[in-house]
Amino acid sequence: MQTIYVDKNRADAFSSLQEAVLAVPDHRQETIRILVAPGIYEEKVFIRKENLEIVGENPETTLFRYGDGARKPRPDHSGEYGTFNTAVILLAGKNLRMENITVENTAGPGHTAGQALALYAAADRCSFRNCRFLGWQDTVFAGEAISCKMKNLMLPDFFCRSSVPVDYPVLRNYFRDCYISGDVDFIFGPNVVFFDQCEIFSRKRRSEDRAFITAASTPAGQEFGLVFSHCRLTGDGDPESVYLGRPWRDFAKTAFVSCHMDGHICPEGWQNWGKARAEVLCSYVEYDNAGPGASTQGRASFSRQLTHPDLAKYYSRENVLAGEDGWNGE
């Protein structure tokens, strides 16, 4: 495997991740690994590649951060940035992997900065291991293919000119042993996403009046949306102050399977975002969870608490991520 290096203290290495990514040819069949030395990298990174690994030494010491929020004025004075221009790292393409890295949006809580993405994951077969994603409102967007949105996004020319495909029938993402923090809708979007043994940390609410972990926008007919398996739901907010999710779109699908939920999860668990129609069309599932926030007493009537033993296999990583090519996140 070819390896290239990012290190601000080495003359024979790239000083930024963006420079290293631009050195990788498009449509390369063999995987290239970018090794990132410890340091704080103040940069926005746009990646439209295939077969690429980005590996840090330790997420505690290898940090990418930037501070764009949705309310920031655009450079051309045509309006505000909007949610989807705020990402610290944007990933598009296929077969991308990130490991041992922290990505932080430093814009601040939603009531001052607006939505502020740390990660925009618009790639298929895209995985994250031992990473941290830090923010407030809308920290991680598991987003749809972006070609249809290019006119609304402030994308660099090299990204738009690339011929690497970004449109796939389904985009699948895998998070393993990751830490994700935020307060409102901080994991959201339409992709098929499997969170495996991650810590989902709800920060004390500052962005809106109520706190929500997820806001799925699963397309109609898609079998899976956001699936949390053997995750730990933690937080530093008030008891019973956080919802598991609400439907950004009517067909939202979210499942918590064999997770531990601390006492910050509210008894209702789920909210309909004022959409009576979504109560009929969405799929909110809980199975085999534990902890003070996992009690099903008082749960929203449109959610489902399931017990069939075969559901463990149905909601397994191998089944959720398989698609047509049998990908399992590895």
Image: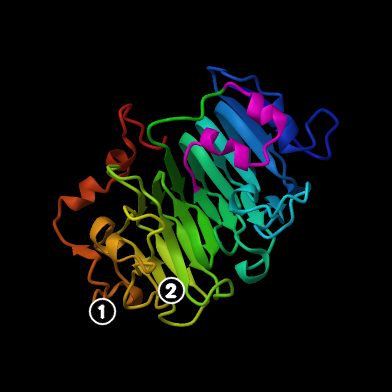
* Residue 185 location (% of width, % of height): 48, 62
- Quadrant including the C terminus: top left
User: Do we see residue 58 in this rendering?
Assistant: no
Dot 1: within a 10 Å radius of its alpha carbon, few (fewer than 14), some, or many (20 or more) residues?
few
Q: Earlier in the sequence, mark 1 or mark 2?
A: 2
Give the image location of residue 177, x and y in percent: 47, 52
Region in magenta = 142-163
Q: Is residue 190 left or right of residue 78?
A: left
How many numbered marks does the figure carry? 2
> Which residue is the extreme one toward the bottom?
239
Q: Residue furthest front?
A: 78
Secondary structure of the residue carrying numbered label 2: strand
Q: Position of residue 175 (x, y in %)?
A: 46, 47
Q: Residue at x 65, y 57 (%)?
A: 70
Q: Which mark is residue 242?
A: 2
- Provide the residue designation for mark 1: 298
Q: Quadrant of residue 277?
A: bottom left
Q: Amino acid at mark 1?
A: Gly
Q: Secondary structure at mark 1?
A: loop
Give the residue drawn at x 72%, y 53%.
66
Q: Is residue 121 magenta?
A: no
Q: Amino acid at mark 2?
A: Val
Q: Residue at x 52, y 57 (%)?
A: 179
Who is closer to the viewer here, 179 or 90?
A: 90
* Disc 1/disc 2 C-alpha distance (Å): 14 Å
The answer to whether 201 appears left or right of 59 in the picture is left
Could you tell me residue 280's position as x and y percent?
23, 60
- Above or below residue 155? Residue 84 is below
In this rendering, position of residue 93 left or right of residue 224: right
Residue 256 or 258: which is nearer the viewer?
256
> Quarter of the image containing the N terminus?
top right
Rendered residue at 58%/27% (across/down):
49
